[in-house]
C-alpha cells in the first residue's frame, strides 16, 4: 500500500513539476514558504435571514492540512465557496496566497483545486473524459493535456478504469475521480468539501492516502471540511471547530484535546460531565477525544459567546413578535 502511494506521489510530483514551472513562477515561486495560503478576516455571509457565516477569521498556513469541522449547517460549505470565489464576499476580506478573492477572482481560481460536496463528475462520461473536461476548463495547455490527464488519473489509482463510464464506478472511485479533476490543474491549494462523506472506511482511507501522497510530492496546501472527527484527528495538522457560522476553537487536535483535559481537571464536578459509569475522577483524567472537545465547545458557545446569545435573543424576539 505504501509503495503504491509513493508511486502515485512520484507521478503527481512529475506532473506538478512540469506545470508549476510557469504558474508558480508568475505567482512568486517562493511565496509558499511561511505564507498564508488562506486568510479570511471578518467574513460574513447570509442567505436571506440565515446567517451562514458570521465574522469568520481563518488563517490556513501554506503547506498544512487544515480541517474545518462542524455539524451540518455550521457554515463550512458557505465559507469554502466564498474562498473559491463561487460566492461573493459581501463583508470582510478573503485572500488566497495574497490574492483578494473579491477583486482578483481569476488569480485565485488559478491557484486552487476544488472538490465540492455535491457530485461534480458526469456519470455518462468516462473517467478520462471527465478529467479532460476539467483540464480544458482550467487552461491546461492543449499539448500537455493528454499526459497531464493520464498523470492525474494515475495519481488516484484510476488508470485501469480510466476508459469506463463513471456510472460504473463505486462511490470511492467517483470521489477519487473528482480528486483527479481537482488535481489536473496542479493547484497550490486543494479545497475538499466533505471528501469522504458516505464512503466505507476502506474507501475513506484510500481517498486520504491519495491526497497525502500528492501533498508529500508537491507541498500542496489542503483545506478540508468534514464532520468525521476521527479523520480530522488522524489527517489534519490543525483544525477549526465551527458551529453556527463561527470558529469556536482552533489548534492542533492534540492541543485542543489537552486543553479540554486541563479545563476538566480545573473544574471538577462540571455539570453534565459525570457519566453513568466509572468514577468521576477517572473519567475527568482520561484524554478526551476531538469529539469531546467539539461537544464541549459547541455547547458552551451558545451560553457564553456574545454574538450567539444575541442571535438567540433576536430569534426569540422575532418569534415573539410573530407569535
Ligand atoms: N443556497 C442556500 N439558500 C439558503 N440557505 C442556505 C443555502 N445554503 C446554505 N444555507 C444555510 O446556511 C447555513 C450554513 O450552511 P452550509 O454552509 O451548507 O453548512 P455546512 O456546510 O457546514 O453544512 C445553514 O443554515 C443552511 O441551511
Ligand atoms: Mg457542507
Image (cartoon, rainbow, N blue to C red):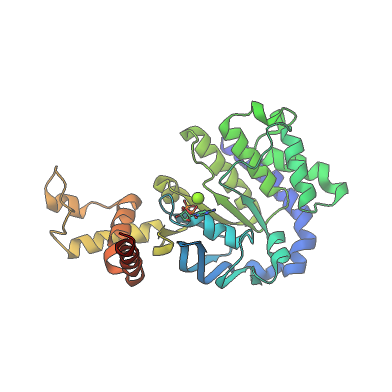
Q: Is residue 311 left or right of residue 136?
A: left
The C terminus lies in which quarter of the figure? bottom left
Q: Is residue 49 left or right of residue 95?
A: left
Residue 175: % across, % down = 59, 39
Residue at the spot 80% in from the left edge and 54% down from the top edge = 139
Q: Is residue 2 above or below residue 274?
A: above
Residue 99: % across, % down = 66, 70
Observer-nearest residue: 208 or 73?
73
Res 28 → quadrant: bottom right
Residue reaching furthest right? 143
Res 314 → quadrant: bottom left
Please state the total of marks drawn on the protein image.
0
Residue 39: % across, % down = 55, 69
The N terminus lies in which quarter of the figure? top right
Residue at the spot 76% in from the left edge and 39% down from the top edge = 150
Q: Is residue 229 left or right of residue 80?
A: left
Residue 315: % across, % down = 34, 63
Q: Is residue 241 above or below residue 135?
A: below
Amino acid at each position: 500500500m505504501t509503495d503504491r502511494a509513493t508511486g502515485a506521489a512520484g507521478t503527481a510530483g512529475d506532473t506538478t513539476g512540469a506545470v508549476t514551472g510557469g504558474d508558480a513562477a508568475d505567482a512568486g515561486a517562493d511565496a509558499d514558504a511561511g505564507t498564508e495560503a488562506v486568510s479570511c478576516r471578518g467574513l460574513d455571509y447570509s442567505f436571506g435571514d440565515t446567517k451562514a457565516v458570521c465574522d469568520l477569521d481563518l488563517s490556513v498556513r501554506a503547506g498544512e492540512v487544515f480541517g474545518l469541522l462542524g455539524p451540518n449547517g455550521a457554515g463550512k460549505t458557505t465559507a469554502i465557496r466564498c474562498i473559491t470565489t463561487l460566492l461573493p464576499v459581501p463583508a470582510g476580506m478573503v485572500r488566497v496566497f495574497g490574492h483578494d478573492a473579491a477583486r482578483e477572482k481569476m488569480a485565485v481560481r488559478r491557484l486552487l483545486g476544488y472538490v465540492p460536496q455535491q457530485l461534480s463528475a458526469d456519470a455518462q462520461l468516462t473517467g478520462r473524459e471527465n478529467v479532460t473536461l476539467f483540464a480544458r476548463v482550467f487552461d491546461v495547455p492543449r499539448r500537455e493535456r493528454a499526459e497531464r490527464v493520464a498523470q492525474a488519473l494515475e495519481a488516484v489509482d484510476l488508470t485501469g478504469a480510466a476508459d469506463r463510464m463513471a456510472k460504473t464506478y463505486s462511490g470511492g472511485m467517483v470521489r477519487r475521480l473528482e480528486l483527479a479533476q481537482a488535481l489536473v490543474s496542479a493547484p497550490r491549494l486543494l479545497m475538499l468539501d466533505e471528501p469522504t462523506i458516505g464512503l466505507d472506511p476502506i474507501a475513506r482511507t484510500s481517498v486520504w492516502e491519495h491526497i497525502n501522497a500528492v501533498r508529500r510530492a508537491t507541498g500542496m496546501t489542503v483545506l478540508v471540511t468534514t464532520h468525521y472527527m476521527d479523520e480530522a484527528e488522524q489527517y489534519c495538522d490543525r483544525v477549526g471547530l465551527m458551529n453556527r457560522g463561527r470558529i469556536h476553537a482552533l489548534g492542533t487536535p492534540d492541543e485542543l484535546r489537552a486543553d479540554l483535559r486541563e479545563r476538566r481537571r480545573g473544574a471538577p464536578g462540571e455539570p453534565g460531565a459525570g457519566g453513568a459509569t466509572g468514577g468521576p475522577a477517572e473519567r475527568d483524567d482520561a484524554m478526551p477525544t476531538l469529539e469531546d472537545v467539539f461537544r464541549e465547545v459547541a455547547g458552551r458557545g451558545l451560553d457564553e459567546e456574545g454574538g450567539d446569545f444575541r442571535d438567540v435573543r433576536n430569534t426569540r424576539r422575532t418569534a415573539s413578535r410573530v407569535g
